[in-house]
Image: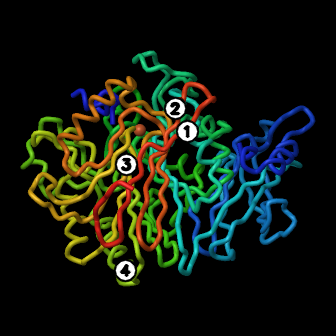
């Protein structure tokens, strides 16, 4: 989504792990201060018996082609009780990134891990496996949209400080593809590397590497497992399956197929995400079971089956053409199978983590943003049909993309009298990416949009932060936590809103 259209409404590890991490940091540097592990450590895609562990080696000499890396998983933060260990080899073929699936772990446990290579050790990371029984509670932080040039990653630091979190859900725009340019007036505090728009594998790798040098981001990764999906900017703005608004072959950017392949390859190299060995290298839709409390389904509404966005003035009937889909039939069938199986297992809640706003952002019968599910109403109807036809209850949709905070009830037609609510949706604010930067203007626009959307319970168009989600058998509690600035690292946090969805209600209420 382009910045001007997204403002549519006009029209370190050391933080949390204390001495343990800072001691390890010394080990990761040689006598000249060179840091072999300068991109930190990360974990992701936890299951009940395994978790992905990630790091990246920076060799000191350019002639090094391959490096053997040891990894160790411990039951304690001090690294005294060794649980698992192994060795892997990385090298130039995968940009010296290291990723492994640590298996044979116990469910619902905290683990600590670190790597060593070239005579140095990484900092210690912490992670957690999923419960396979009946947890009383699940706690998630939900984030999206972290543009490096627009601010410090205070939001990641705030998330790193949370003691009890099962996982961080990152719903896309982990990085941005743009060149440095003075094009708009929103203050920028730092510059992207490389200077130009990223279009080829070397560029995507360099940008991922730059983001991962940020110590506030490193702190969040070292502290909690991440479950991530990409949105558009991990490839190019407003992408779809076969193209992108910000992909211009006539400007020497090559073919979309080659660019998309490069973006996906760098993503899988640099993110702690599990690949499907038997399937296309681009598959990221997948599911996670948190015991019998929550099934989480992560979608790819961006690159997997999406048709091109309709022009802004497309009429509502044309939008309904069955060929206008945001996910493929295959992914849609997979989602239905997941929802039905989850309901049949009697799992209490079903969360759907995905990229773009699912609920209606329609004012005076006019769709405001063709890049979200509003632009693909047939696909939305299909999901609502699967929920209603199969009597799927307790569905909450988690969304990113729009650099602003929203909470809404989901029905087929929220503008009807007494619409039947079938699910709820929580939209996360951005880590740094701007929306409406003037707080007074943001407040005025938010008031207007509240008037126009009867299904809306909360909206903020200005602040950066994250959603904390706490789930138990009785309810989902969703709190919007904001930082007061991203322009300096001296920030304060506050909670602006808390909404509750009681089990069986499919509706939101104020806490
Ligand atoms: Fe974004």
- What colour-coding does the image apply? rainbow
* Residue at screen point 72% across, 44% down: 15
Q: Quadrant of residue 392?
A: bottom left
Residue position for label 2: 484
Judged from the image, the secondary structure of the residue bearing numbered disc 4 is helix
Residues under labels 1 and 2: Cα distance? 6 Å
Residue that carries the numbered disc 3 in the rendered image: 427
Of pointers 1 and 2, the one earlier in the residue sequence: 2
Q: Is residue 187 left or right of residue 415?
A: right
Residue 493 falls left or right of residue 252: right
**Of the residues tagged 2 and 4, which is closer to the observer?**
2
Quarter the C terminus occupies: bottom left
Q: Along the polypeptide, which appears first: circle 2 or circle 3?
A: 3
Residues under labels 2 and 4: Cα distance?
42 Å
Relative to residue 53, is residue 95 depicted above or below? Answer: above
Q: Position of residue 190 (x, y in %)?
A: 57, 23
Residue holding disc 1: 493
Q: Disc number at residue 341?
A: 4
Quarter containing the N terminus: top left
In-front residue for pair 297/464: 464
Instruction: Check if mark 1's residue and mark 2's residue have beta carbons within 8 Å.
Output: yes
| Label 4 beta carbon within 8 A of ligand 1 | no
N-terminal label among 1 and 4: 4
Measured in 3D between alpha carbons, the distance from the residue under mark 2 to the one under mark 3, in whole angstroms, is 19 Å
Q: How many marks?
A: 4
Q: Identify which residue is drawn at 45% across, 68% down.
A: 287
- Whole-Å distance between the Cαs marked 3 and 1? 19 Å
Q: Which element type, helix, strand or loop, lies under badge 2? A: loop
């Amino acid at each position: 989504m382009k910045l001007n259209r997204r403002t549519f409404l006009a029209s370190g590890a050391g933080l949390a792990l204390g001495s343990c991490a800072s001691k390890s940091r010394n080990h990761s540097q040689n006598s000249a201060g060179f840091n072999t592990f300068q991109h930190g450590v990360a974990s992701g895609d936890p299951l009940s018996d395994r978790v992905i562990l990630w790091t990246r080696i920076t060799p000191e000499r350019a002639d090094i082609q391959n490096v053997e890396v040891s990894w160790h998983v411990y039951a304690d933060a001090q690294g005294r009780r060794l649980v698992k260990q192994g060795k892997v080899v990385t090298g130039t073929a995968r940009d010296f990134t290291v990723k492994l699936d640590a298996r044979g772990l116990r469910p619902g446990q905290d683990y600590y891990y670190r790597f060593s290579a070239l005579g140095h050790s990484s900092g210690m990371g912490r992670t957690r496996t999923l419960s396979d029984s009946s947890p009383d509670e699940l706690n998630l932080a939900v984030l999206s949209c972290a543009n490096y040039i627009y601010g410090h990653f205070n939001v990641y630091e705030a998330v790193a400080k949370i003691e009890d979190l099962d996982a961080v859900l990152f719903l896309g725009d982990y990085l941005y593809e743009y060149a440095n340019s003075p094009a708009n007036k929103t203050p920028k505090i730092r510059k992207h590397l490389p200077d130009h728009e990223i279009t080829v594998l070397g560029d995507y790798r360099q940008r991922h590497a730059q983001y991962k040098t940020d110590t506030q981001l490193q702190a969040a990764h070292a502290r909690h497992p991440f479950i991530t999906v990409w949105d558009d900017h991990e490839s190019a703005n407003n992408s779809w399956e076969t193209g992108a608004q910000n992909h211009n072959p006539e400007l020497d950017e090559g073919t979309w197929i080659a660019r998309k392949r490069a973006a996906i390859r760098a993503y899988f190299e640099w993110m702690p995400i599990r690949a499907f060995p038997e399937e296309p290298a681009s598959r990221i839709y997948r599911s996670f079971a948190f015991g019998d409390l929550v099934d989480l389904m992560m979608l790819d509404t961006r690159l997997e089956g999406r048709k091109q966005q309709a022009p802004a003035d497309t009429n509502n009937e044309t939008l309904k053409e069955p060929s206008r889909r945001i996910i493929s039939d295959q992914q849609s069938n997979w989602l239905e199978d997941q929802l039905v199986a989850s309901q049949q297992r009697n799992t209490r809640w079903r969360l759907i983590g995905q990229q773009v706003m699912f609920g209606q952002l329609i004012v005076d019968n006019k769709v405001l943003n063709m890049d979200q599910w509003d632009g693909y109403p047939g696909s939305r109807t299909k999901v609502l049909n699967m929920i209603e036809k199969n009597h799927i209850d307790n569905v909450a949709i988690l969304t990113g993309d729009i650099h602003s905070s929203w909470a809404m009830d989901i029905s087929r037609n929220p503008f009807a009298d007494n619409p039947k609510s079938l699910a709820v949706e929580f939209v996360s604010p951005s880590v740094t990416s701007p929306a409406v930067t003037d707080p007074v203007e943001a407040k005025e626009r938010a008031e207007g949009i509240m008037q126009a959307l009867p299904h809306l319970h909360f909206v903020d168009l200005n602040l950066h932060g994250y959603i904390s989600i706490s789930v138990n058998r009785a309810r989902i509690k969703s709190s919007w936590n904001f930082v007061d600035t991203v322009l300096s690292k001296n920030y304060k946090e506050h909670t602006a809103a808390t909404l509750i969805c009681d089990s069986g209600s499919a509706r939101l209420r104020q806490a």
